[in-house]
Image (spheres, rainbow, N blue to C red):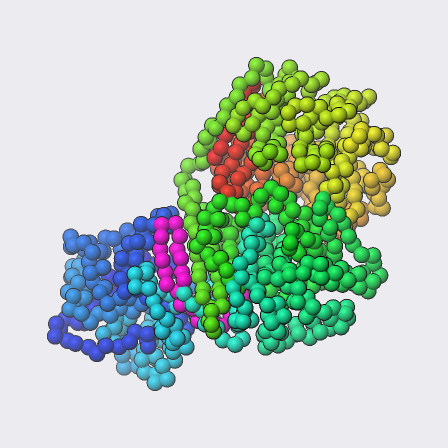
Amino acid sequence: MNRIAWLVTSAVVLLVSGYLLFDKYYRPLNVDVTELVPENAALVYENKKPFEAWVKLAESELWKSFQRITSLKNFHESLMNLDSLGGEKDLLSAGITNGMLVSVHKISNNQFDAVLYIDVSSIKDQKNADKILEFFISTGNLKSVDRTYQNYQIKELKGNEQASTFSYLIHENLFIGSFTPFLIEDVVRLIDNDQNEGFFNKNRDMLKIPKLANDDGNVYINTANFNQLFNAFQSESDDVLDHHNQSMFYDITIENEKILLNGFTQVDGDDFLNTFLSQSPQKNNFQYYVSNKASHFYQLGIENGPDWHERLKKYWESIHPELVSERLLFAEKYQFDFDGMFAWLGSGISLTNIPSSVSNDHKLIMINTNDLTEAMRQLNDLSERLAIAQGDSVYQESFGELVIRELNVTNFPMHAFGPMFTGFEDTFYAVFDEYLVMAESIQTLKDLMTDIEKENTLGRSLIYNKFSVNTQEESNFKLVINTPVAWEGVVQYSNPFWKELFRKNSQVFKGVKYLSFDFSALDDNFYSSIAFHYEKPSLSSTADIFDAEKTVAFNYPLITKPLVVKSHLDNSKEVLLQDSSNHIMLISTKGEVLWEREIDGPMVSDVDQVDYYKNGKLQYFFATGNYLYIIDRLGNDVDDFPLRIDYKIDDASVIDYDKSKRYRFMLTDERGGMYLYNKEGVNLEGWTPREVQGRLACQPIHIRVRGKDIIMAIQSDGKVHAMNRRGEDIPGFPFSVDGRYNGDAHIQLGADLQKTLVSLLSREGRLVKFNLAGEIVSTDQLYRPTQESMFNLVNDALGKDYVIARQDLNRLVLLNRDKNELLSKDYLNTEELTVQYYNFSNNHQVFAISDQIQGFTYIYNTNGVLINSRPIDSDGKVGMMYYESKGKYEVFVVSGNTFKKLSF
């Protein structure tokens, strides 16, 4: 609502009270305000001391940040001014002595408005109203117009021509007003309606629930109407609440960094929640398996699987009869026993949504079982029957300790658990600890394993744990929203009316870090709670500022970028460096030099960490011009290393096909020859070397699709090779694409070779996409302002996304994968700049642009704002980490003989 809404409302409320109740001896009959709230209200708020609650909210960190939104700031300032009209303090709080009620209604496709109800029967209310009336009359700001509707006099107050019209009426002891005239007409129709078909007539039991005496108000919600209100914000209507027919009541508690709502929910027979009425609330620990990259997750608490299944089937018969028919056909066709599945179902199921910038969102299902052996037997049997039915072999892949299998049928989770679990074109499953996990892709399962190993989950987040103490530990239905990650999706699907406001104030809204909804069965109702957790964001109009945490100076210039590695002792980040005297050194997270030693020459590769002895202890693999090194954390060589190579090494990397730690070492020479060694240093057949006819544009790439290993090599002249483990070309390769190439290749993994896409960008701006069946999928010539404009494709540090860098002489432009401009900056140097892209999550993306000639690195946030308002001294590429639990970035830089660790 584009109003200084409640300022003017509060003013006019008391103005009208003074105007019509001038007779100090007038005593109206008391009317119950709950009888006059129209049926179409989405929610109703009531408070006996509304101004006190407002002051409490205004003093909270949450509201202080939300005042960055201009309309809210103006409203707050005006309300404070009104409260002290005529030099008196607390005019509003003294004037509203009998409480206030507000109902909220959808009034158009993209707007909502409210009706305000205040009891103005006391003499004190009238005196305060007179003071406000005198103020507005003296300033001449308002004009009053009368109209009659169904024999009731409605007054309309107007300011200038652009101002909104405020309509109101006095009915007995109640003032009723709104900026939307037809909402007042709804109230009038209800006054003369003998059937009393109002909001509380349909939600009458909510009024009987005991209320806290000293809370910050109460709110009543009707989900049928609330869904319409929810759709006012969206570009397309959503039926997310269509099958949730609920009446809700909540007590509200406002604290500095959180808002808590606790109360009860009543549901009718056709509501999904009713399937849990016979289930005791359950405690689950799914948060330890939910990535910090998730936008939201659901958690269902189940005490008795078979009983819940019976209730689900009755619910589906009423709401989703087509699903009942589909399940029967599925069970008959594949001899699958859904009853047996629910028999081994344990205390809960979770469904996690992880946004993706390159495909549909990724989904993960975690299932707690009471008999994991039986669960795997049943699913493995189904996997075999599905493979036989399709004339295929059973898919199974080992990845570290995981054994991944496939259910090769569309939407198996939906058939098992209902429409909430749709969106699984393929279903892959594995066991994590005591949980059965399902995902729509192999890579999603592997990414989860990586996140768990790196402790990049909600359960390991300090902020989430601080938030979760205010949620229900045991529940039947829980929804947790990770607002910063989910926000881009909210903006994307909001309608144009709201999109501009949401985008402009994104940082404010993202300050609400988590939002949760909990429901727990209690008798015939549900104990319910909603929790908001707020962390003050950086809202300064200036850029973030670097803190220099550690500085270490050495005797000789440093010649490598900071090589960030992990300590196997405590998972902390350490840094390997090399100086011009060919000494390498390991720097601890505290900035201490843990050891220093000499090697034979400059490194020619990055550092990869390996667990050479398979004992959980990590070593460092890298190459110099003529040697392969594997060094342990104490600086000592692993047995049989360094390994002398009789040709000039151009680059080196590690391949771990199935995360079994049976490593392969891929080496290339300057002519493009590729050599593959096992971990004992034996050069393998087919790679002695595997020759190509030209230099390589980038390091050979290992791709694993459905258990098949492919090694891709791209020549700088555009010839593309794809080979199996033995170095043999796979069908469809090699082939050539026009242009010159020296940037990254981006891999988008799919369910098979044909669905796995590779993106290449030539120096001239030709973007080519092909699949691993050797088929060109698309070509696109990007806009090239000048003949001197040069392009590069730059993967993010984890290879999940990419940006396009275009350099037009001294101007650098970055584009996202949709070719939308991210930033455009001018630099002194016309030589090519080095671009690094860090995409830690949808909400945390950073670009580092290094000018090696000038000796600067510029670091920009997602808005293209330069961190620290100036570049940092740096000889080239930097290292960077982001810590979700701390909300902090760390940057590792080298300049001359100095190493620095910065943070922001």
Give the answer, above or below, for where 124 lies relative to 876: below
> Residue 31 is drawn in which quadrant?
bottom left
> Residue 817 is drawn in which quadrant?
top right
Residue drawn at (74%, 54%) of the image: 405
Viewer-closest of 310 and 479: 310
Viewer-closest of 902 and 184: 902
Q: Position of residue 497 (x, y in %)?
A: 46, 58
Q: Position of residue 37 (x, y in %)?
A: 35, 73
Give the answer, above or below, for where 562 lies relative to 197: above
- Asked whether, in this view, residue 329 is left or right of residue 433, the answer is right
- Asked whether, in this view, residue 337 is left or right of residue 868, the answer is right
Which residue ends up furthest to the bottom in the rendered image? 194
Viewer-closest of 761 and 842: 842
Give the answer, above or below, for where 697 lies relative to 189: above
Give the answer, above or below, for where 606 lies relative to 58: above
In the picture, the quarter occupied by the N terminus is bottom left
Residue drawn at (63%, 59%) of the image: 367
Residue drawn at (64%, 61%) of the image: 370
Magenta-drawn stretch contains 903 = no
Look at the image and tell me whether residue 537 can be seen: yes
Q: Position of residue 410 (x, y in %)?
A: 71, 63
Viewer-closest of 175 and 327: 327
Q: Position of residue 699 (x, y in %)?
A: 73, 33
Residue drawn at (51%, 36%) of the image: 889
- Asked whether, in this view, residue 357 is left or right of residue 713, the answer is left
Q: What residue range appears in magenta?
A: 238-262
Magenta-drawn stretch contains 253 = yes
Q: How many marks?
A: 0
Look at the image and tell me whether residue 503 can be seen: no
